[in-house]
Image (cartoon, rainbow, N blue to C red):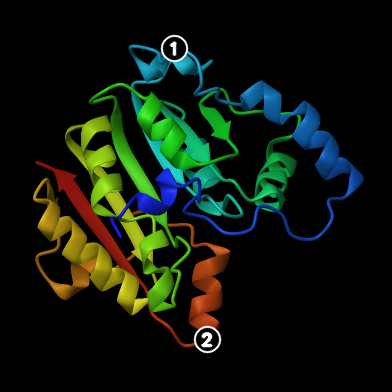
Amino acid sequence: MSDNSQHQAGKAFFGRRKGKPLRDRQARNLAEVLPALALDPHGTAPQDPRSLFAADVGTVRLEIGFGGGEHLLHRVRENPEIGFIGIEPFVNSMAKLLGQVEGSEPPNLRLYDDDAVTVLDWLPDASLDHIDLLYPDPWPKRRHWKRRFVSSVNLDRFYRVLKPGGRFCFASDIDSYINWTLLHCRDHGGFDWQARSSEDWLRPYENWPGTRYEAKARREGRSSAYLTFVKV
């Protein structure tokens, strides 16, 4: 089965869409706050994605599967001159992030609550400066590995939308997925792994805020790897 055959068959790279029932305020934020920040990747794509933002931004960064939003919101607030697109199909996670921006929606943030592939295929060539894929679903069972987001087809998508010299950052605590990503990026040929020593990939990214998934991994005795690739 090819890397993307499951997506072509209508199956996404993520699992369930919703967890426990939403509280009234969370449901209201999804109905009222999300539309103000929502990206609509179904119409004509902008020639320059910087125009998607209310703020005057110089570069654009995409985070796929932002979870609780700890990293995304940290970066959004730390870098008002960068436009951030955050993608998260899990309803409860989106609701959590919206609760943190309610009433003070950042002008340099846009959100999408479905499959990241839709956005990647919509964006124009060489339009992103950076892509983050942090603690993605590892699909640990071997028979499910084909559903991992890192694949030859999705790396083609990353390569197309990243500018020359653009960065792809990947973090995980699952050894098999770390090795999987290294091998796929090596075999793709369009990405240069930036590590020159073990310290380079065991050390968190600069100004790293941590995430709840990372904290869980630490509690369970797993270390993390932080991989950086540059489009060549």
Give the distance between the C-alpha atoms of the residues marked 2 and 1, in whole angstroms. Answer: 45 Å
Nearer to us: label 2 or label 1: 1
Q: Is 201 situated left or right of 87 in this image?
A: left
Residue under pointer 1: 44
For the residue carrying disc 1, how many other residues have a C-alpha within 10 Å: few (<14), some (14-19), or many (20+)? few
* Residue type at numbered disc 1: Thr
Q: Nearer the viewer, residue 41 or 173?
A: 41
For the residue carrying disc 2, how many other residues have a C-alpha within 10 Å: few (<14), some (14-19), or many (20+)? few
Which residue is pictured at 37% across the width and 48% down the height? 132
Quadrant (top left, top right, bottom left, bottom right) of the N terminus: bottom left
Which residue is pictured at 43% across the width and 83% down the height? 222
Quadrant (top left, top right, bottom left, bottom right) of the C terminus: top left
Residue 131: x and y in percent read: 34, 42
Considering the numbered disc 2 on the image, is that residue within a helix, a strand or a loop?
A: loop
Question: Relative to residue 134, is residue 127 depicted above or below?
Answer: above
Residue 38: x and y in percent read: 61, 26
Which residue is pictured at 56% across the width and 76% down the height? 216
Considering the numbered disc 1 on the image, is that residue within a helix, a strand or a loop?
A: loop
Question: Relative to residue 104, is residue 69 depicted above or below?
Answer: below
Q: Nearer the viewer, residue 170 or 99?
A: 170
Q: Is 138 situated left or right of 160 in this image?
A: right
Residue under pointer 2: 220
